[in-house]
Image (spheres, rainbow, N blue to C red):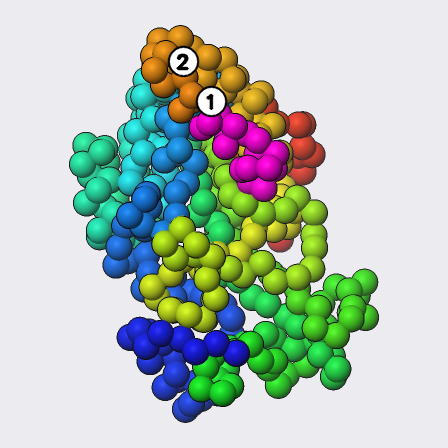
Amino acid sequence: MSEAEQTALAASFRRLIERHGPMPVSRYMGESNARYYTTRDPLGAAGDFTTAPEISQMFGEMAGLWLADIWARAGRPADVLYVELGPGRGTLARDALRAMASQGLRPEVHLVEGSDALRQVQSEALAGARFHDSLDTVPGDRPMLLLANEFLDALPIRQLVRTAKGWRERMVGIEDYGFAFVSGPSPLDEAVPEAQRAAPVDTVIETGPAAAALVEALAQRFDVQGGAGLLVDYGHLEPRTGSTLQAVRGHQKVDVFVAPGEMDLTAHVDFATLDLVARRQGIASSLTTQGAWLTAMGIGLRAQALAKASPARAEELRVAHERLVGREAMGELFKCMALSARDWPRGAGFPEGERRQAPDAA
């Protein structure tokens, strides 16, 4: 049970629940984040959280070099797109594009961003960028080089909970004047893998239909357009149980019901499932940790070079490097997913994942 701040969205949720009954976790998360992301710049010290590109230029440089290397091994096609999902302040794109330019790659820039506030910031950082509300309007006639950092974790998840009567949808209701998790009325045992159906009462299983749909759409685009992509987020490489839904506000974790629409709601990304989704479309997919990928890309050497060029920044660079790759920092928690079209090279720094053929059209 939690008593929410009386935000406009909290009041709206309360009216909806009182009239129509509990709402699915997916709706609560989706509508909360839609309000949150379209009304503010959430990044940096004055915001609610800090992402890897804001920690150091090295992250974006490694991502840009990763894409440039694939492009070069694909024969250096002349007309390619750079596409970023949820570009934040444009920091990742700026650093990645600078690194790409050093290798002779100057793609047309397309940013998928729904926030007017962030579009303004991105326009100042990336002159000439073209904006899209969704992936649907990004051109589909040229190879696509794609980055998405901390984008998947904010997509709405669905939760199922094991009750004494079987599996039910986990929902948001009202108890003792506050929002609380409750179980839905309809049996959903058939939606749970058979091996997990006898789990203990109160076990929670999460699925990410929105993330899966996005990866499927990306895979289909890569199959038609060619290209490659890198998705980075916190999550897991093996299926697991338990709720990972969390809220962050002012750089602190808070109760997920405290202020809907005024805090960042996220959940760990199920990369194991997304990997299967991509490979079923016939493209190459591979997974690793952020620390392993950055290390393989040579971030340590880059940190040394920057420190040598600017000794006054040596300690700052050491701290940033450790934060990005350290096992107790972001290095293990954050995972990387590499995607590439079937006739494009695989990305550096990843194990050779299985490449399946797409099923024949019926």
Query: Under tag 2, what secondary structure?
Result: helix
Which stretch appears magenta? 319-337
Q: Give me the disc on residue 330.
A: none
Horizontal arrangement in the rendering, residue 345 relative to residue 95 (left or right):
right
Q: Quadrant of residue 332?
A: top right
**Residue 127 lies in magenta, yes or no?**
no
Question: Could you tell me how far apart the alpha carbons at marks 2 and 1 are, in whole angstroms?
Answer: 9 Å
**Residue 322 lies in magenta, yes or no?**
yes
- Position of residue 341 relative to residue 65, above or below, is below
Q: Quadrant of residue 19?
A: bottom left
Amino acid type at circle 2 is Ala
Q: Are marks 2 and 1 in contact (CB under 8 Å)?
A: yes
Residue in the image at 74% along x and 84% along y: 165
Q: Which residue is mark 2?
A: 307
Q: x, y percentage for residue 31?
A: 38, 68
Q: Which residue is mark 1?
A: 318
- Position of residue 238 relative to residue 54, above or below, is below
Q: Does residue 289 appear in the picture of this structure?
A: no
